[in-house]
Amino acid sequence: MLELKHVNSFYGNIQALYDVNLHIDRGEIITLIGANGAGKSTTLMTVCGVVQAREGQVLYQDEEITRESPNHIVHKGICQVPEGRLIFPELTVQENLDMGAFMRTNKAEIKRDIEYCFDLFPILAQRRRQQGGTLSGGEQQMLAIGRALMARPALLLLDEPSMGLAPLVVKQIFEIIKKVNSENNTTIFLVEQNANLALKIGHRGYVMENGRVVLSDTCDKLLVNEQVKRAYLGL
Ligand code: ATP
């Protein structure tokens, strides 16, 4: 479904990604782990066109999207939940969800999907008329995911959904990510510092260090890999 081939990405003269190769098959949850500054967010941003790869190729459904604008990439079905959530703080929960459906026209389907989001996150249903900015961190993360789902993405990019959240909320959010993947066959590319949880819900995983992919395997194998255990699982 998605393939990165020999991707080099830069911020000005600073190179952030070095010869990154990875692929994601339809229906998978792919986990990307790595330390601060390893290049995880840059990888996601290179997929969604916010950062353009200077060299190499990004292919989506066998079509090259390396130089496409973020706007075109969203229209192709790739949607990102950025780090830090970035919901619309002044808009209500319901309005934030409506904004996620901005590319769609079928009102009945939009209504059905809003109800689906409320089933996934019942707390959002209770707070549907509350301004987004007044929600707790966990609720804002739920809203950010819900809003992305309203675009009915084929590929959902999640950048550190656990960041700054209490363990119980993180667990809840990860269970919902898994549910969205299994119920809708939404393919998920999950970037996480919480390697333990992320490797538990992923099918396959990649490990990045200093802008390079240094390891890739099934998540089951990565969880017992000595290098991963030492560097990322604190074992
Ligand atoms: P984190 O978990 O801290 O978000 P990360 O693995 O997502 O880390 P990136 O944010 O992709 O890492 O950063 C990769 C490298 O690119 C780092 O060296 C970082 O300093 C650099 N970088 C990121 N954003 C910019 C920017 N806007 N301008 C210049 N350099 C940047």
Image (tube, rainbow, N blue to C red):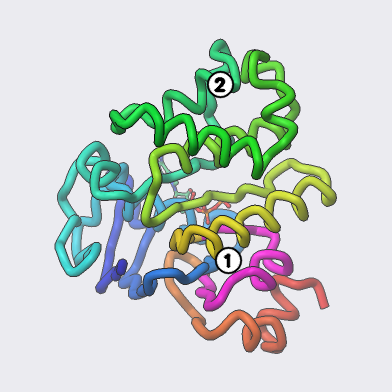
Tell me where the magenta segment starts and ends, as one range.
Answer: 190-208
Secondary structure type for disc 2: helix
Tell which circle, 1 or 2, labels the residue nearer the N-terminal end: 1
Look at the image and say whether residue 202 sits in the magenta stretch. yes
Outermost residue, top side: 90
Q: Is residue 135 left or right of residue 114?
A: right
Instruction: Pinpoint residue 35: horizontal percent, then vertical percent.
Output: 61, 61
Q: Where does residue 46 sit, x and y in percent of width and height? A: 32, 53
Q: Residues within 10 Å of mark 2 (few under 14, many from 20)?
A: many
Q: Is residue 30 or residue 211 the one in the foreground?
A: 30
Q: Residue at x 50, y 74 (%)?
A: 206
The amino acid beneath tag 1 is: Ile
Number of numbered discs on residues: 2
Is the CB of the residue bearing disc 2 within 8 angstroms of ligand 1? no
Mark number displayed over residue 94 = 2
Q: Is 148 on the left-hand or right-hand side of 180?
A: left
